Amino acid sequence: MPDRPRDELGRPLPWDTEGFPGVPVRTTIDGVTAVAEAREYLGQGLPFHAHEVLEQRWRCCPEQERPLWQGLAQLAAGATHAARGNGAGAARLDERGRATIARYDGPIDDDVRTLITALTEPASN
C-alpha cells in the first residue's frame, strides 16, 4: 500500500491528492549524513522531513547511540509542532527530547550541537 500523501509539514492529505515530496526511504543512514540532511531540511523550513531523517538514523544506529538519535528526532517533532502552530505540543516534545538526549553518555560533536540549537530555537519562540 502506498504511503498517504502529506503536506510540507507532514500533515496527512486526502488519498487522491498529490503530496509534498518526502524523505527518501532507506533502512540505514550514517550519522554525518543524517545531521547534514536534517540541517538542510530545517534550512528549507521542513522540520517534519528533518524528523524523518533523524528517525531513520535512530532506527539503525548502534544501541549506545539510541538516546541521542531518539532525542534529536523528538526535538525535530517538536519543531514540526511549532511550525504547525501547536505550541503546547512543541514544548512537550522539546522537553522530552532534551531529557532523552541527557541520557546519552557519549560525545556530542559541534555539528550535532548546532543541530540541537536549530531544532530548539523554533520550540522556544
Image: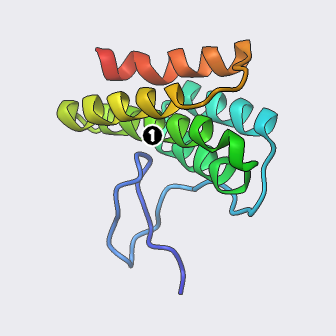
- For the image, the number of numbered tags is 1
Say which residue appears at 54% left-offset and 43% top-offset.
Answer: 70
**Quarter occupied by residue 94:** top left
Which SS class for mark 1?
A: helix
Q: Residues within 10 Å of mark 1 (few under 14, many from 20)?
A: many
Q: Which residue has dot 1 on it?
A: 74
Say which residue appears at 34% left-offset and 65% top-offset.
Answer: 13
Determine whether, in the image, residue 82 is placed left or right of residue 98: left
Determine whether, in the image, residue 27 is placed left or right of residue 76: right
Residue 117 position, x and y percent, is: 52, 15
Residue 58 position, x and y percent, is: 63, 49
Depicted 9 relative to depicted 24: above or below:
above
**Quarter occupied by residue 68:** top right
Q: How is the image coloured?
A: rainbow
Say which residue appears at 70% left-offset and 42% top-offset.
Answer: 64
Determine whether, in the image, residue 100 is placed left or right of residue 93: right
Residue 74 position, x and y percent, is: 45, 40
**Quarter occupied by residue 67:** top right
Determine whether, in the image, residue 82 is placed left or right of residue 10: left
Mark 1 is on which residue type?
A: Gln
Depicted 109 relative to depicted 62: above or below:
above
Residue closer to the observer: 27 or 108 = 108
